[in-house]
Amino acid sequence: NCRNNQSTLYNDLIAYYNFDGGSLGDDKTGQNNLTITGSIGTTTGRNGLALDCQATNSGAFLAIQSLGSQFSFGTNQNFSISFWLKTMGLAAGKVVYLKTSVPTTLDFQTSATSPNFNASEVTVINLNAGTAVAASVWELWTLVVTRTSKVEIFRNGVLDATSNTVNTAKNFNFSTLALCGDESGSTGGAAIDLDSVGIWGRALSPQEVMELYSGNSGLD
């Protein structure tokens, strides 16, 4: 957990999970540790360990179901979510899952058809990747939500898809976060590996997204 004080990526960083050192669900910011339920699969990641969602036993999951107030983005706060993903092929499954108490859910999921990556919340965010996810290759996916104007998906540091339709009335006060499935583990099991999951309470700039991809941020 090396900190590079020159990087702006530490500004408004709410949670960061790289699955190395301590407990598998530890948040490297020290604020939002995930609770592990069941047997969680791991594999070789980009740098150390990664989650092996397919090897995770049925009904197992990592989740926190009482997120702190820093996850309350309301109707006007920008936010960003980034993670490294490796798929073993076209397979359906939830990768990162956020839910409010309403409930409203924001899902990042792969599917069995191309393009097989989607960020979806139905009324605010429903954005497909521009091209299919490459099998057996680590790729960095970053969602940047600017509440007043646009939603963007970046792939490997480069803008991949964008939408200028944003429902600013939707309240994003998230209370639950889960990885490799939802908070019950029932939608996990996809043939994917997951590493370096980060959440920010602001919109990352294109330069910062590229910094994440190039590995110069020091977050890992």
Image (cartoon, rainbow, N blue to C red):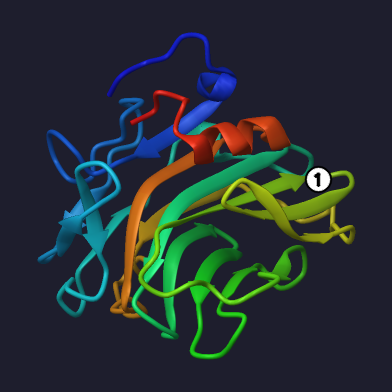
Furthest toward the top, the residue is 5
Q: Residue at x 74, y 53 (%)?
A: 152
Amino acid type, residue under disc 1 in the picture? Arg
User: Residue 160 at what x, y percent from top left?
Assistant: 71, 60
Q: Nearer the viewer, residue 71 or 207?
A: 207
Q: Nearer the viewer, residue 34 or 21?
A: 21
Quadrant where the N terminus is found in the figure:
top left
Q: Nearer the viewer, residue 70 or 51?
A: 51
Quadrant where the C terminus is found in the figure:
top left
Q: Is residue 207 above or below residue 60?
A: above
User: Residue 198 at what x, y percent from top left?
Assistant: 46, 40
Quarter of the rendering containing residue 165: bottom right
Position of 164 with respect to 170 (left or right) is right
Q: Residue at x 37, y 16 (%)?
A: 3
How many numbered markers are drawn?
1
Q: Helix, strand or loop at disc 1?
A: loop
Task: Say which residue label 1 marks.
Answer: 147
Q: Residue at x 50, y 21 (%)?
A: 10
Q: Is residue 101 above or below residue 200?
A: below
Position of 67 with respect to 185 (left or right) is right
Q: Residue at x 13, y 40 (%)?
A: 23
Give the crowd class for mark 1: few <14, some 14-19, many >=20 residues within 10 Å. Answer: many
Observer able to see residue 201: no
Position of 138 with respect to 172 (left or right) is left
User: Residue 100 at what x, y percent from top left?
Assistant: 55, 56
Observer able to see residue 200: yes
User: Residue 47 at what x, y percent from top left?
Assistant: 26, 41
Quarter of the rendering containing residue 38: bottom left
Q: Is residue 149 above or below residue 104?
A: above
Q: Is residue 112 above or below residue 14?
A: below
